[in-house]
Amino acid sequence: MNMSAIDIAGLEGGRVNLTSKQLDELEARLEGPLLRPGDGGWDDAVLIWNGMVAKVPALVLQPTSAHDVAAAVGFARDHRLLLSVKGGGHNIGGTSITERGLALDMTRMRDVTVIPNAKLAHVGPGCLLKDVDRATQKHGLATVLGFISEVGVSGLTLGGGLGYLTRRFGWTVDNLEEVEIVTADGEIRTANRQENADLFWAIRGAGANLGVVTRFTFHLHEVGPTVYGGLIAWPFDRAEEILRAYRRITTEAPRELAVWLNLLRAPAAPFVPEQWHGERICALVVCYSGDLGNVDEVFAPMRALSDPVVDLLQEQPYTQVQSYLDAAEPKGNHYYWKTEYAAELSDGLLSTWRDLAAACPIPEAQLGILHLGGALNEHDGDDGAVGNRDARYACGVIGIWKPEEPEADTFPQWVRDAWKRIRPFSTGGNYINFQTADEDEERIWATYGANFDRLVEVKKKYDPDNVFRSNRNIAPRTRAGNA
């Protein structure tokens, strides 16, 4: 089709005018569609999870192959266009769409190929976690992915990745064997520990800065298909008891057990007794992927707490546990949070956590602690850019509200103030995928710590013009600003 000229956001700011001839030439090189506002499929292509940071691009390209991606990257580079990449669109900071830019929507590249005997899975960049889990669980296999099934594999992995299996097998990128990636020069490269090893090192934790991954290859482990897990909760007036028990349970837990803690108001869900709807509770979300014959012993400390408001712990498919929290994070809500890694749950952190939850004015907020540690702590600090090998917990003050919430203007500040109270208990590091759009460069430096300067060198080699900047950006310069 003959596309009319369009103004599009440029790399250095301002607008670039693309002529109809230039657009036609791009389209002629593609197998996938090039969409403009009003075209069929446009609304789904630009929809992202966090309504608070939604943006509207000028063009959306839906590649079907690495060659399409290479054509798009080359075109964006040559014309100095602002480029973004959408895998699942689930990033809290909204990095997958740039205002008036060129967006790559990877949803047409959603294949999963499992090789059971080799315990490998080749995964397309448009896959959601549920796509991979469903495919691998047919063979009783899984890799380390997140805990919301609608999250995109690409974004999760390129930022490091964590989930219920992290304690057993490390960060997601500790299980990444290889990628196919289009770099800023438009080349399609393979990167692994032997080939383009420096690039592979950087991809494992900061990959959005280095290119567009068009295929992931993950190592798989024997997990499921049946695990033991679900949700159990107690009244908030028992918070001090539950928090101390949580510390004890997680400190002593086998690696097959991961326990997420959430302090929140109980939802008006069918599984919650009506008298508890809207009341504050202490909830544990659990996944035990070990020997089911040991369930009674493993869960004895949890059962000893007795008299829960809700107890949904049971044997169930691993895929069900992996989607258990989906309903708590629907698309279109406004999300704003602040997080830190912690090495321990000190008395001071636990009492601060309880006090914040008791005072929280955001009706749908959650104060969450993710149970990590284990295998991730056994790697060297420079094994992948991801770092943070001292993390044993991730703590987050999670603001959630409807777009029409009348008090919404006050909520972000409450989250920031709460965050200030938990920062003294931090390792100093944090998870790049949990950073909001308003966090500064110092937070990015803190994410990578001692690995940051090495990352800059890899960035300068593979993307010296910072074509890939719609992310938590590592610019190709030192902290002092010199090239």
Image (cartoon, helix red, strand yellow):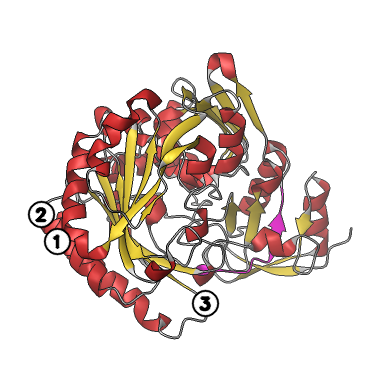
Q: How many marks?
A: 3
Q: Which mark is residue 480?
A: none
Is label 2 in a helix, a strand or a loop?
helix
Q: Nearer the viewer, residue 346 or 195?
A: 346
Q: Could you say which is closer to the camera, residue 91 or residue 439?
A: 91
Reading the chain from its start, which is encountered first: label 3 or label 2?
Answer: 2
Quote the CA–CA distance across marks 1 and 3: 31 Å
Tell me, for residue 347, which label it has, or none: 2
For disc 3, the marked residue is: 403
Crowding near pointer 3: few (<14 within 10 Å), some, many (20+)? few
Instruction: Tell me which amino acid carries mark 3.
Output: Pro
Density class for disc 1 (Cα within 10 Å; few <14, some 14-19, many ≥20) is some
Q: Is residue 333 left or right of residue 474?
A: right
Asked if the residue under mark 1 is in contact with the one under mark 2, i.e. CB atoms within 8 Å, the reply is yes
Tag 1 residue = 351
CA neighbours of label 2 inside 10 A, class few (<14), some (14 to 19), many (20+):
few
The amino acid beneath tag 1 is Ser
Residue 64 appears in view: yes
Q: Main secondary structure of the magenta part?
A: loop
Q: Nearer the viewer, mark 3 or mark 2?
A: 2
- Looking at this view, name the residue that lies furthest to the left: 347
Residue 59 colored magenta?
yes
Region of the chain picked out in magenta, as a range: 53-62
Which residue: 39% across, 70% down?
Answer: 275
Q: To which quarter of the image does residue 386 belong? A: top left
Query: Left or right of 195: which side holds 453?
Result: left
Say which quarter of the image contains residue 358. Answer: bottom left
